[in-house]
Image (cartoon, rainbow, N blue to C red):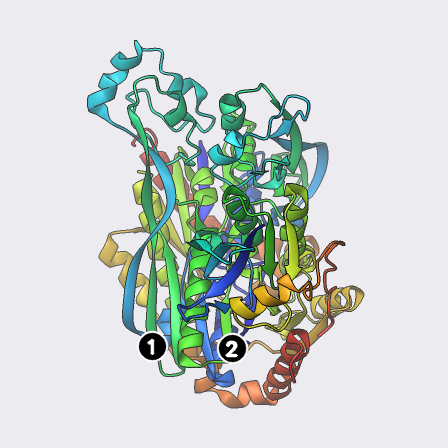
Amino acid sequence: MVLAFSVKGDATPPLLDERFGRCEAFLVLDSESGEIQSRKVNSGADASSSAGITAVQTLANAGVQGIVAPHLGPKAEDARKRLGLRVWNQGTHTNVDSALEAWRRGELEEITGDSKPKGLHRA
Amino acid sequence: MEICIVSGKGGTGKTTLATWLFAYHGGSALLDCDVEEPNAGLFLDVGWDSVESVNTGYPIIDEYFCANCGACASFCAFGAILSSPKATFVLPEMCHDCGGCGIVCPHGAITFGERKTGKIGQGVVNSPREHGGFFSYGELNVGEFSGVRIIKKLRESAPKDRLVFIDGPPGTSCSAVAALENVDYAVLVGEPTPFGISDMAMAVRMIRELGLPFGVVVNKAGIGNDDILDYCHKEGLTILGSIPFKRTVAESMAGGREGWLEMEEENLQIIAPIAEALALEAGLSQGVS
Amino acid sequence: MIAEIVVISGKGGTGKTTFASSMFAALGDSVLADCDVDAPDLAILLDPVPSVHEAFAGARKAWIDPVVCRNGAACDGLSPCITRCRFAAIRSDFRVDRHCEGCGVCFHVCPAGAITMRESTTGSLMVGSTEYGPMVHGLLEPGEETSGKLVSAVRRRARREATDAGMRFIITDGSPGIGCPVISSLSGAHHVVIVTEPSISALRDMERLVDLVESFHIPATVVINKADISETMTVRVQQFCRSQGIAVGMTLPYDEQVINAITRRTIPFVAYPEFFQDNGFGPFLANLKLSVADYLGVS
């Protein structure tokens, strides 16, 4: 499967970003071989709203079939579902290698339902 | 003749001045073009003739013909269409209604529908002063990205047979430009504070780029200092007059229509010399580009 | 995690910028982002020492090459660019004017390939250092449309500065209104402070603003400024907040000394701290920090 990760910085192994839509870059790789197909700088991070939607489209254009990501906002979640991309939550993993290993072992939670907004907090 | 009131900085007294000038000139017209936050109507008693929705177009994708080729999504400069080999769908609120997706689709899968982006209301003004004038306002729906379309419609439906005042939006964005374009004269409301002067300078630039004759009204005169007068003199700006800062004025405008009516005579006395100066300047400038 | 607090107002002139500057000076450990890109005023009070000044290319605009187009000769005068443009942005002399929204239709329909889409500079982005911490601000060219993108760019840069400097907070001064630049300042924010005043206009504007804020599901607190201008309206504002379940975090009377501070280009909190302290600024900031920590799920 063509899998994408939200990454930041230039460490090896690449560090996972805590954000999806406004992350620094996306790493696209082949899940079986682990071979990196591309690292795309996230130009959509400057979108005025819902950068997550732009991110989803960028990944769809790159032929991505699955995403390992932090929390997706409701709009991005809706977009990826409609475009037919699968998504797994990266949990507490901090770099691509450990997250990929966990994904291969089926340890990551796949997000299938609707994303629940946090609701209006009363300060 | 059309006179547009703008301010650069918000909260300087643009709507206050626009409604007072409108009240002073019985039978004239007032267009509230601050479509994100239209407030002029709060100070008037209007007999409404109509409230109509303002629509904008958006693409509808016919799944029968759509091959998920992605041509429309690639073309769309505004991120309003998303596409993958499995599905293609539209985000209507992002659409700028340019029509391009319909042109590039190779399968004839796109038609266009209409959706509401805001509304326009218009009517006859009963008070203050048994005015008898025309009032219209535009209101942008929350979440929409631009009020320019609504402002253009407001201006198109303005009466052509009388003096028209336009209450413009704050700032210098494309909305302010849409309210100002092609008017006969602009009035720039400034306040004598460092923020007021800084924002005024940006508005001056915008008005000059549009090639419009304009004059300045200094509101809340007395707070701050005289730097604003120095600025106006340095730039060779016409000062139409000033409105002194008075807590009573602020308090009366805080209350809306009731507050206005309580202070009506006093307010009109303050505005009279400014209105006369404006009539002189705008009249003189008529026909000059 | 870095927490971003966005200060907005709906109606202009309520004291949003004044309040944001005071929050920045009092809170510490923060980066200031001036996202009121039509009218960025914080630099007047903060007097930043500039380190970066970048052109901001916010938009694509169509450009018609006069040599290829030859005033419509290249398309035998059919000018599909003019007929197809929905924004009336192409003049009869085939020059593209300020109404161009960069859609690309003219580029697509020109049979002679005379049109290209070019990045256009619509504003600038600046980074500087101030006495209270780093500051990022953006300035949009008058008449431009792309304020939302510039706001995003300013916020993104502020986040980078905060990360580099190890700051915990970003204070974002947003635009008035409810349009694109405001939407752009709310996306991803952790707390919203709405600065309002007791007038019918401000209340009306706040009602619309609260609709927008609620759609983002971000916790909000209201500050009522110049409260003694109208007791009646202050009560109405408080009632409205109660009905929406939004706390009023602070109520400040109108005070000439605040204006005097601004006129002297000083941050009101710095010039006149007693005014803020006497009106509950300490508890307000403490509650803000608690709320943000709670929202982020950290202790």
- Residue named by callout 1: C129
Residue A85 relative to residue C154: left or right: right
Q: B100 or B175, which is in the foreground? A: B100
- Residue named by callout 2: C169
Q: Which residue appears at 62% of the width and 86% of the height?
A: C286
Viewer-side label of 1, 2: 2
Q: Can residue B239 be seen in this view?
A: no
Specify the farthest residue to the top: C76
Residue C145 point in image, percent of width and height = 43, 45
Residue B108 relative to residue C99: left or right: right
Q: Which residue appears at 45% of the width and 44% of the height?
A: B176
Q: In which quarter of the image is residue C299?
A: bottom right
Q: Which residue appears at 55% of the width and 29% of the height?
A: B69
Q: B134 or B268, which is in the foreground? A: B134
Q: What residue type is labelled 2?
A: Phe
Specify the farthest residue to the front: A33
Residue A75 point in image, percent of width and height = 65, 51
Residue A45 point in image, percent of width and height = 48, 56
Specify the farthest residue to the right: C243
